[in-house]
Structures are given as C-alpha cells and as structure tokens.
Image (cartoon, grey):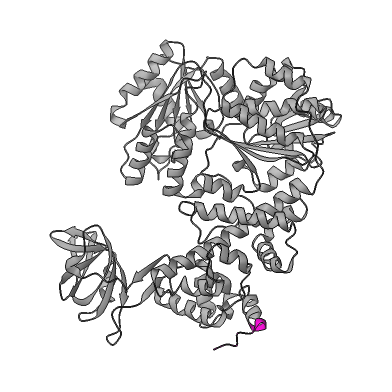
Amino acid sequence: MPDSTARDRALRLAAHHESVLFARHVDTTRAEALGRLGINTIGDLLEQPPFRYVDLTEVTRAVEARIGSDVTIIGTVHEVKVKKPKPRLAITEVTLVDPTGCVVGVWFNQPWVAQRYRNGERLAFAGKVELDRGLRTMKAPFVEKIAADAPAEGRILPVHHSTEGLSPAWMRRLVAAAIDDFGDVPDHLPTDLRCARGLVNRSRALRDIHFPATMADAEAARKRLAYDELLASQLYMALRRHVLTREQAGVAHVVDGPVGAAFRAALPFALTDDQRHSIHEILEDMATPRPMNRLLLGDVGTGKTVVAAAALAAVADTRSQAAMMAPTEVLAQQYAGKVGPLLDSIGVGWALLTGSTTPARKKSILDEVAGGRITVVFGTHALLDAHVRFKRLTLAIVDEQHRFGVNQRLGLRAKGVAADLLVMTATPIPRSLALTLFGDLATSYLRQRPSQTSGVITRHVKPHAAAPAHQAVRAAVREGRQAYVVCALVDESETASAKAAVREAERLRTEVFGDLRVGLLTGRMSATEKHHVMDEFRSGRIDVLVSTTVIEVGVDVPNATVMLIEDAHRFGLAQLHQLRGRVGRGEHPGEVWLISDPRTPDAKERIAALLSTTDGFELAERDLAVRGAGHLLGERQHGLPDLRIADLVTDLSLIKQAREDAFALVDADPHLSLPQHRPLLERVRRIFSQAWEWVSSG
C-alpha cells in the first residue's frame, strides 16, 4: 500500500496530468485506443465515469423479471444458435437459464456473438426485458462472464465505454490499476465547503464512481465529481465577472436624460411588464460606474429589440457610442430598418456596416465613427475588423450571441474602455444551460408577448395530405398577406430525402401556386441577392417565400401570416420554435403547418411537443432532455470544456449550489489567493487554460 504522506499524495495528483502511457498496463497500442475515447492523461482515465453498472447485488430471477423493466439475470448458457430467416438477416440467440426459467439474449446481424459464449458458461445478462413469442428476451444485453468459482452476487460491475482493442473488461482492469496507483490524492475543496454540501472526499469519489459497494455510493461519488466540474466552471465565470465588472472603471451612463425621454414618448405601443422590468435592470446597470455584463434572454416574439433600443438612447444621452452586432446581414439590416427610423426621430445618428457595404460608404462610416459623429453602428462580424475604431464606445450589444464565440463577444467590447456589454438571444435557453455557459452574465428574461401580436396556431399534416396547408397559403394571399415555405436543404441530395428549397420553389411555381409570386431565399446566395429578395418580400412583391432556415432568427415581416415547414421532423424543437416565431408577429394571427411523416419516437415526440405548447422555455427544456445541449446552441463557447459527469437535465440544483458557492468564494477572496483556495485556483486555471486570458486580462 503506497505511503499516504502529504508529499506522496501531491505527487500522485501531479501525475494526473501526465500521459496515460505512464499508467500501469498501458502500452502504445492501448494508449492509442484510449485516445479514441478521449482519454489522454491519467486524470482522464480516473475521471471518465462508467456509462452504466451491472448491479449483481440486485439480481432478478428469470421468472420474476417484469416485461419492460431493466434487470440483471444470472444463469447458465443452455443454447447458442444463429438463425437466418431472410438472406440479409442473421439473428443470434443465446438462451440463459436459472432455476426458475430462462431469458433469451437476441442480437441482429451480429453472428460473431455466437462465437463468444459456450453451453454451460455462467453469464450475467443486463438489459430491458421484452416479450417475444411468449419468451422473455433482451435485445443486445450487456453480458458479463462469471467464473465458475466466483460468487454470483454481491458486486457492482462498472461498464466503461470501450473501443476496438480495448474491451470493457480491460477498461475495468486499467481503471482499477490507476486508482490503486494514483487515486489517493489531496482534496482541493476546503473542508468546510465539502462538509456544508455533504460531499464525500475526492479520493473516495474517484474510487466509488468506478467500483462502488452500493449504488448509493456510486451516486454520492457522481454527485461529488459533478459538483467539482460545475464549481470549476462557475469559479471561472465568477473570476471573469469580477475582473470585468469590479476591477475596471466603467462609464456611469445618463439613464434619465432627454433622449431617453424622447425615446419613450416616440414608442407607438405600450411595453409589456417584462420589457419594462428588463429595461429597468439594464439601465440600472448602465447607471453605475461598473461595466455591465448582462444577458437578455427572450422567447420568440417578446420584443427584445425595443429593450435594446432603450439602452441605445442612454448612450446618446451620455454622448458616447454603441455597437450592435448581429450574426447575419439579414438580421443586421433588419435592426437598422426597425431601430434606425426610431433613432432618426429622436435625433440619434446611426450607420449600418456589413461585409457588403461598398468601399466608399465603409470609408465614410469608419471616419464618422472614429470622429464620434455616429452614435450607433449596426453590423455583423465586420464590426470586429481592426479598422473599425470608435471615439468612445461605451456599450456593445451582441445579438443571438450563441452564434459568436467568447472571443468575438468580448472582442467587440474591447473596442471601448470597460464598455458595458449586453448580449441577447431569442433562442430560449434552459436555466441549467444558461447558468453553465453564461454564468458570468446577469440575466433578464422576456416571456410575455406584446399585446399587438396575435399569436400562432400550429397544425400537422402528412405530405400526401398537404392540400389544406396549400389552401391556407392561398387564403392568406387572397386577403393581402404572405407566406413562407421552409425546406431543410438547399439542393437535392442523394443521401437525403428531404425536400430541397431550389426544387421545391420550382415545383410550387409550376404545379401548386402557378398564379402566385414565388421567391427563393437560401444561405448560399450572396448578401446582395439575400437583401434584394427580402426587400421584395417585405414590400409585398413576393407572395410566397421558399426558404431554408436562413430565416430562422430575427426575420420580421408582420404581413407574413402562414408558414409551411416541409419535413418538419428533421428539425430540432428549438429550431422549429424559432421558425414558428416568424409568423403571427402583427395584427393577424399566424398559422404554421408542419408537413411531415415522423417515423421515430423522437421525431413524433418533437412534433407532439410543438403542437402542445408555444412556450419556448418549456420546449427548450424538452429539447435539452432529448437531444442535449449541442443542438440548442450553435458555435460552441470558446475554451469551455465539455461536462463528463454533470447532467444539465437532472443537476439543476447542483448547478445552483456550485454557482452560489463559487460567487461567494470570489466575493470573499477575489483572486482565490488565500492558502485554502489556491488548490481551487490552480484547478480552474488548468481546466480553462485556453480561455484564461479573459480572466487575467479582462
């Protein structure tokens, strides 16, 4: 047994950062295989949890295995056979018997499985029990061989992810050796914090996550290691927020000046309670000399544009400048078209700068911005160009911010000196995901839709029965309104059966809406072409706009009241909700027709969810549970590591605890410089090494 002195434990911890080649039983071939699993260091090997357990402490007798339940059954192989009912179908069956009955393991088109097991062998089957022709079966169960002289029960076996050349049994052996050699380490958590949260120490957690005595021990270990992941993330956010908001002198904006008053008087509609509350929170932040760091999180159609405009008015009263960056030219042009006239009416100068701005116009804008003669600049990534220099930038607004990385959102802010930052999104984000990815941002929510919008009715039809959807388009056009038809693809694809926008536009022109004006908009078009098509649509010279998801975010044409979404089952819930938000934005109610024939349970569930609610936050929670965080966000956040153990669906309370603890630690010790906090600081610096510049430099 290794000596457990403090020095030895520190050396074992340091070894966690070494190559997995230093682990016992790992040669270059196994190191290569481990690398395919994302395991490159000894620490990776210790912290990669099993994806399931075979609980031999809870063995079910075959006769008592309930249909539909997940169970473990131990028995003896009675028969192994391969059947070929069709030329291209092989069914392997392994019959396992115990004193009470039998269960049949079934594998499709995996005939080699029959070579693995012999009559008389003792096996454990773990999986879901189904009923097939009167027999209890398990489809592709997890199988563990049990030595003839080994006790059948009393153990919990971890099942780690495996790969070619590295079986689950070998993974178990490698992890066991690594725990023996490197698992006893000092704990980076302060004892008082660990005790307050009821967490086991880290050494025990590393052992019990892999080899627990009970499932309760496994869950306690998972909780501790998940908390470690979440605390590191939240400490990084808290440190970054402290640097950005506490250690830099910002601008105390004038929030009750004449331009702001003129802005409020010029609004042609009443604000919702959510809009008023969000404007109050934003202006309250802007009025302080500390830089604002806020996220405006709005559901589709809740009116975040007017909230942002209120912040722009405060910038004008402060005699400084603001930049508003959107992810697409269509959206940037739309903001200029909607907010620009309002700014004109209250005497605020503005400009639009995108990649398609002509060289002469761009030079003029750059000169006026540098001289301070333009107060507000709307734009795309073009705003990040080194040639764009502001005289006094005090507010940076980043819209649909998840489409930009952290570098880009903070890069725009860096064009001023400690400028206020407002990031916005109309993509509803579950609370757990918002806290994890955007924990450095205070959050304002918009859930209420303005009273001047009329809402949306959502319907579902099969492709062969789409006539009512086409009739809805015709009825809308007869009444002077317009429609969208959304397709999943731009062109035909040999590997996909989804309708392509180019082909569908031609089909609708010639076969369905021959007497209507049908236009086409795709992401492959040039900026000039997109701008022309959108102008034609907004002006009413296009009746039906066939489009890809380029219209998903922000496009606002109140006269468009009907949307047909072809192959709707191919889209995620969040994306479908965003698309639905393009209609019903004016005085007339919207209609969305989901045209699809969903075959999988997941696809059917998405369609049913969209029909059941218009609450984007509820849909986002469902999407997170089914499809994971990657489908809710676009570009991944720069430098933020993936979570291996914490679960954004089930660990919301743990996320809140970690956030509360992290911000309390940084409030009490802003640089984590106290001796008891230095291990935490070193851990965070190591995990977030790629993004640490934003903490160290702000």
Is residue 548 among what the camera can see? no
Inspect the magenta stretch and tell me whether residue 579 lies in it: no
Q: Quadrant of residue 382?
A: top right
Q: Closest to the observer: 497 or 408?
A: 408
Q: Position of residue 496 (x, y in %)?
A: 40, 43
Q: Closest to the observer: 462 or 53?
A: 53
Q: Position of residue 347 (x, y in %)?
A: 77, 17
Q: Position of residue 328 (x, y in %)?
A: 62, 34
With 450 as the anchor, is 65 left or right in this view? left
Q: Residue at x 24, y 63 (%)?
A: 138
With 61 as the anchor, is 513 left or right in this view? right
Predominant SS along the magenta part: loop
With 683 as the anchor, is 176 left or right in this view? left
Q: Which residues make up the magenta segment?
A: 1-8
Is residue 451 among what the camera can see? yes
Q: Position of residue 653 (x, y in %)?
A: 51, 53
From what the image shows, is residue 215 above or below residue 667? Answer: below
Q: Residue at x 74, y 17 (%)?
A: 346
